[in-house]
Amino acid sequence: MNKALVILAIGGLFAFWTALNYHFIRMDEDLKLLKKTELTFDKTFVDARGAKKVKLFVDPTLVRAGVKDLIRDAVE
């Protein structure tokens, strides 16, 4: 029982840390990771399928993180 709680706690801390540090951007074909510039839960999961990519170019949080380069690489 103690091992299970320790493993669950470590897994939870890893998920919490990952959600604070990365944007998960769902593209048309795959999932991209983008390092956040600030430790927040804001814009952790972003949908960029189809025409929704245009909205990402005007979001200051994602622009600072480098979403323009990420989308440019995905389109090419």
Image (tube, helix red, strand yellow):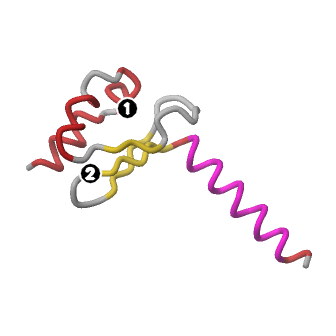
Left/right placement of residue 4 relative to residue 16 reads right
Query: Residue 9, how many percent across, how many down?
Result: 78, 61
35 and 51: which one is in front? 51
Q: Is residue 68 magenta?
A: no
Question: Which region shows up in magenta?
Answer: 4-20
17 and 49: which one is in front? 49
Task: Say what secondary structure mark 2 lies in.
Answer: loop
Query: Residue 30, how many percent across, how many down?
Result: 28, 60
Q: Is residue 53 above or below residue 10?
A: above
Alpha carbons under labels 1 and 2: distance apart: 16 Å
Task: Determine the main secondary structure of the stretch shown in magenta.
Answer: helix
Q: Residue furthest front?
A: 51
Left/right placement of residue 71 relative to residue 7 reads left
Query: Residue 55, how many percent across, how many down?
Result: 26, 29
Q: Which mark is residue 74?
A: none
**Callout 2 amino acid:** Met
Looking at the rendered image, the disc whose residue lies closer to the viewer, 1 or 2, is 2
Residue labelled with disc 2 = 27
Q: Residue furthest right?
A: 2
Q: Residue at x 58, y 32 (%)?
A: 40
**Callout 1 amino acid:** Ala
Q: Residue at x 85, y 69 (%)?
A: 5
Residue labelled with disc 1 = 65
Mark 1 / mark 2, whichever is N-terminal: 2
Task: Say what secondary structure mark 1 lies in.
Answer: helix
Left/right placement of residue 76 relative to residue 53 reads left
Q: Residue at x 43, y 41 (%)?
A: 35
Q: Residues within 10 Å of mark 1 (few under 14, many from 20)?
A: some
Please identify the quadrant where the N terminus is shown: bottom right
Q: Quadrant of residue 64?
A: top left
Query: Residue 37, how many percent across, how many down?
Result: 47, 30
